[in-house]
Every structure is written in structure tokens, then in C-alpha cells.
Amino acid sequence: MTDSFIFDAVRTPFGKYGKALAGIRPDDLAATVMSAMVERQPGLDAARIDDVVFGNANGAGEDNRNVARMSALLAGFPTSVPGTTVNRLCGSGVEAVIQGSRAIESGDADLVLAGGVESMSRAPWVLPKPDHAYPAGDTALVSTTLGWRLVNPRMPEQWTIPLGQTAEILADKFSISREEQDAFALRSHRSAARAFAEGAYAAEIVDVPGIDLTRDEGIRDETSMAALAALKPAFLANGSVTAGNSSPLNDGASAVLLGSEKALPGIRPLARIIGRGVAGNDPDVFGVAPVEAVNRALARAGKTWSDVDLVELNEAYAAQCLACLRLWPDLDPEKVNVDGGAIAIGHPLGASGGRVVGHLAHALAARGGGIGVAAVCIGVGQGLAVVLEASPRR
């Protein structure tokens, strides 16, 4: 077995639903980060890439029929470079990194381009076929943008509640107040705005051709506790989960270049992958599934929270993140999402995993080394986690 390393990570700025990136097809978004990644590596011939593994949570529209392969061809990669698309919903990008790292460690590959893409703006409506020929009545189009659809009637009803209601369940179970959730959201926006102003994302953001967008479109610099408190509950009339303390709908793409230690001579890796974890739980409390996934990943890496310097926890909902923190009493919350999270940055489902892993690698390298954890909750009751180690810079 050999070790697997992250050599580089890039992403587009994340666009708001229906806004800056809505006119860009998902396969073009993915091709943008793929080509940008190769161009950044001195002397790298794309033909050396053993596989392209990209996450995507929809696949019902322009991202159909293996968007990883389609995008690699659009990026100008040789037809000899294969590609596969993986779908673990919100964790698809992390799953891509995990699968790529396993291929490297087993010796099946030396260089893998992982990542993910999602255009929630362009997610299509679908028209189910009728059960019987020649139906006389009307039928309805179904949105594929987010959440449960075309549900099997045998699935327990409690598991198929709207995603935001699962955050309400966690808020109630862990006594998480509206004020706590809004304060968490405010920190996300302020941290993201500060990080962009300080250049913390400069190493990973790449331009989308023809689009004037240099930072994530959803960051609200001027938001406040008063502004967040004025928002009405989004899922339950007397609830505490709002649009302001939830992640928005977004478009974007991310890419992470993985390799063996000597896959790219002359280029120092950002970090080494030292632990991975996956876990499942009841779908109506999927937001805390990262807890067990991280616990398993840390155990496999031989680390504890006392060893960890930074955490990238994807912010599906403030309540969900705060519930995880309740279950990690040994984790200093100030280590979590120091440069903002998905509530501000955005959550284009298939791309978010590449963002959290990629930014963690850059952030660890920028601070001169350390141990980091990237984790994501996943609808239908799953969690994924990766542990990274960055060596001190000499």
C-alpha cells in the first residue's frame, strides 16, 4: 500500500440559484475546473491522469450519462482518460476523493482527478411515465432541484419529511435556540467575507469564462442578528429553521488532484489523506450522521480531537452543525469553519465535498501544517469524513 496525497484543489465561485452561473451547463462548469487544474500544474500532460472521479447528486438533466466523462472530453482531455460519476448526494464530492485515494493507495492509479459539480438552477423537471397506457387525466411535473421526489410508497413517511424539518427535529432534540442558529449563520457570513478579503481563498478560486464573479455570490457582508431574526421560519410555523440559518441552493464545481507521493515530481503535496469514515443513521436525523463518520475516520487515523487543528463541516443547516458540536464535546468550535461555511458560501450538492476537502488542504498548508477533518451530512441518513495531515513547510 502507498499513501495518497492532495496536490492541489480548485473550484469555481459558487453562484446563487438563478443568478450568475445559472446560464452555464453543469458539464461546462466541471470542464472549467478540470482544465484549470491541469493548466496550473507545470508540465502536466492530462494523458497522465489515470481516472476522473466526479460527484453529482442529480444526473437528471444536462449532467446525465456520466458527467465526469462528458466534462473531461469537454475539457480537452485525451479520450484515453476515463471518467466515472459517483452519487452519494451531498457527500458526492467527498466520495469522489475517497474513491480516488483508495485507487492510489491500492496501486490501481498514480494520479486521479476528483471533485464534483452541481447546477441546481438547471436541475430539470421530470415527467414520470404513467402506470397504465392512455391516461385520461392530468399529470404533474416533478422538480429535481432538491430533496425527496418520486418516493417509493413503502418508504416510512417519517423518513421522507422535507430536509428542513429534519433540522427542526435536531433543534428540538438538542435544545438549540433560534438565536444560536442565527449567531452561527452570522459567523459563517462574517468569516467568509473576512477570508475573501484576506485572500484565504485566492489559491483555489478559478474564473468561469464569460462570467464576472470573483467570490461566492451568497456571502452577505452586511447581514446582522437583527436581519436574521426578522426572517420567518421556513419549514414549521412555530419553528426556528429559516432561510437565513440554512444553506442556499447553488451552482458550482470543484476539483481535487490526488496522487502518490512522487506522482508529480517537483510539486510538494498540500496534504496526505490519513483517515476516512462513512456512517449511516435514520434519514430524519441525517444531520448528525457526520458524528460517527468522523469518529471512525479519526480512529483509523490514530488521532483524537486534541490532535486536530482545523475542521471543515459542511453547513447544511445551523441546527445540524450545532447538534454535531453538542455530540463532540472535546472539539473546540473555534476550529470549525474558520473561513466560513456553506450557509454563506453555498452548497451546490455534488461540488461541496470537493470544496470542504480542498479548502481544508489549502488552509492546513497555509498555516504551515497540521491535522484537519472534513465532514459532510448526507440526505437519507449518511455521513462522510476525511482526515488530512499537512507536514510543516521548510
Image (tube, rainbow, N blue to C red):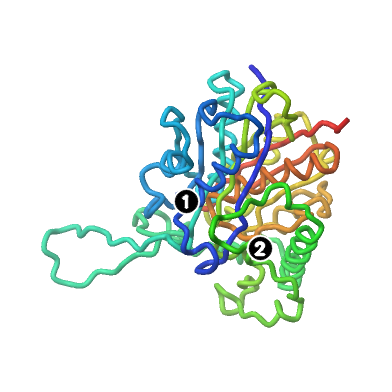
Q: Amino acid at mark 2?
A: Ile
Q: Which residue is mark 1?
A: 28
Disc assigned to residue 112:
none
Q: Residue at x 57, y 79 (%)?
A: 237
Residue 85 visible in the displayed image: no
Helix, strand or loop at disc 2? helix
Q: Are marks 1 and 2 in contact (CB under 8 Å)?
A: no
Specify which label sits upstream in the sequence, 1 or 2: 1
Q: Position of residue 374 (x, y in %)?
A: 69, 44
Mark count: 2
Say left or right for 136 vs 186. left
Q: Amino acid at mark 1?
A: Asp
Q: Which residue is mark 2?
A: 343
Residue 198 visible in the displayed image: yes
Q: Residue at x 66, y 65 (%)?
A: 171
Quarter holding the N terminus is top right
Q: Position of residue 224 (x, y in %)?
A: 76, 76
